[in-house]
Image (cartoon, helix red, strand yellow):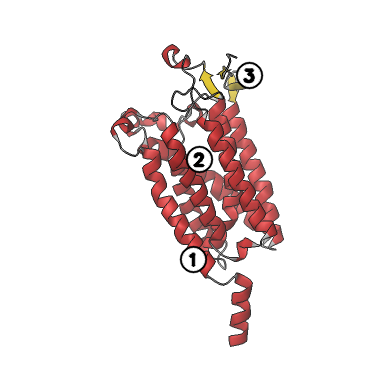
Amino acid sequence: MIFGFIDWDVDPVFFHLGSFPVRYYSLFFAIAFWLGYVIERKLFEHEKTPDNWVDKIFIYTIVATIIGSRLGHVFFYGWDYYSQHPAEILKIWEGGLASHGGGIGILIALFLYKKFVAKDKSFLWVMDHIVVPVALAAFFIRMGNLMNSEIYGHPTDVPWAFRFLRLHPDEAALPRHPTQIYEATFYLLVFALLWFLYWKKSFYKREGGLFGIFLIGIFGFRMIVENLKENQEAFEDSMTLNMGQLLSIPFVILGICCLVYALKSKPKEENAKLNSHKK
């Protein structure tokens, strides 16, 4: 460590399973899914949903996250390369996932989940319950990025700056914003807020509220922190807003709409009472 800076020289490979390298990123991904399953089961049991619902939403979400994140990276950030090397798209273990693609994939998958599994629930009900563990998963994913020394920030002289020594020598000497830690910390706070609102304020009774807060918090902060991050692809250098910011805008708008709808609507139990009185 140099005074005022932190030298970061972590090997991204945690251990080798035979000749196969097990990376911290993959390990954190697995932990995120496991904790997500535990959390989702707790939420579903609290609301007495059918036993198989949580297993099915877990499968839908895993498949959507992996496929959506990979295709998001391919189409949003690396199409020039992957269009010429399509076989490389399958090499997900080499890295290259985009959270916006994962978000789109999850939206599509959970729409299908509502259609074929949770038929008597609204789409907003489904989204309110999935975003709680997803916020925690976002924390682990960014910590995985830190272990990979990727998605780092601009050069800076702040005292907590990191020098990512595994970068190209010209870049490794520059202290940079540890934007992975900024995002991971904020995402953990979003998870804590959603957890608090679910259990202490029963906010899940206002359908769309937790989903809206998640979108505003996660993608709103993403738009801010992108100002401190190096662009992931060269084509972004000429853009006023980079790709991450542009892709965040519709998510934030959707989040605002969902939150306004939730705050203006009657809680679910009150709606049920009103309907019973009408009958």
What is the secondary structure assignment of the residue under circle 1?
Answer: helix
> Which label sits on residue 18?
3
Which residue appears farthest toward the left when viewing the image? 238
For residue 236, above or below residue 257: above
What is the secondary structure assignment of the residue under circle 3?
Answer: loop
Q: Percent position (x, y) of residue 134?
A: 57, 46
Examine the image and state in which quarter residue 186 appears. Answer: top right
> Which label sits on residue 261?
1
> Which label sits on residue 169?
none
For badge 1, the amino acid type reads Tyr
Dot 3, how many residues are within 10 Å of its Cα: few (below 14), some (14-19), or many (20+)?
few
For badge 3, the amino acid type reads Gly
- Ranked by sequence position, the earlier of labels 2 and 1 is 2
Q: CA distance from mark 2 to mark 3?
A: 25 Å
Q: Percent position (x, y) of residue 89?
A: 41, 32
Reading the image, the residue beneath label 2 is 66
Dot 1, how many residues are within 10 Å of its Cα: few (below 14), some (14-19), or many (20+)?
some
